[in-house]
Image (cartoon, grey):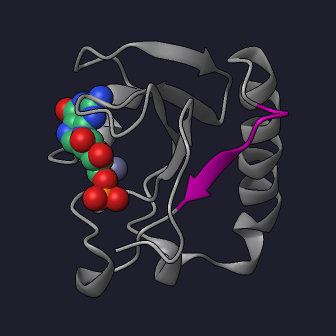
Amino acid sequence: MSECIFCKIASKEMKSSIVYEDDEIVAFKDIEPKAPVHLLIIPKKHISGLTELGKADELLIGRIVGLSKTLAEQFSFSQCGFRLVANSGPDAGQAVEHIHFHLLGGRKFGWPPG
Ligand code: 5GP
Ligand code: ZN
């Protein structure tokens, strides 16, 4: 998608601080971090959000969840705890319409979220 900022980050047309990349997935630092470590994990393929996921995307999403565990270990908050969040639609405050998973760590998080 030509106007999608996360597609531009995935293609390196737009600069970001990438911490992981493979042929299907990119993880990079959120520009406005909400925790000491705040990463965004995205598929390179444009999918606008959770509601647009198809059966064929299940393996990809499973890989993203698996990567969150690996990154939590790399950033040393695997044992003390962390949060993996995907906002979907206006009520959840989804601002970027390219599916993304927030991986947050390095502080305590409240529940329920606001
Ligand atoms: P959402 O509210 O859609 O779940 O989260 C979008 C996230 O993308 C926000 O946390 C926001 O700070 C982040 N973000 C928006 N634009 C950019 C950008 O250009 N670069 C990076 N690295 N993060 C961005
Ligand atoms: Zn996109």
Q: Is residue 5 visible?
A: no
Left or right: residue 56 versus residue 17 is right
Screen quadrant of the C terminus: bottom left
- 53 inside magenta stretch: no
State whether residue 85 appears in this view: yes
Q: Position of residue 1 (x, y in %)?
A: 27, 50
Q: How many marks?
A: 0
Q: Residue at x 72, y 28 (%)?
A: 77
Q: Does 39 sit left or right of 96 as displayed?
A: right
In the rendering, at what x and y percent does residue 39 appear?
A: 48, 32
Q: Which residue sits at x=71%, y=46%?
A: 64
Instruction: Measuring from the top left, give residue 7's x and y in whole percent.
Output: 33, 39
Image: 5 above or below 48: above
Q: Tell me the residue at 41%/29% (across/down).
A: 10
Extreme left residue here?
A: 3
Quick one: 45 or 80, which is closer to the camera?
80
Q: Nearer the viewer, residue 111 or 38?
A: 111
Q: Position of residue 109 (x, y in %)?
A: 52, 53
Q: Viewed as shown, does residue 91 lie left or right of 104?
A: left
Front residue of 8/105: it is 105
Q: Quadrant of residue 80?
A: top right
- Vertical comparison of 20 with 59: above or below: above
Residue depicted at x 45% and y 59%:
99
Range drawn in magenta: 78-85
Quadrant in the rendering for residue 111? bottom right
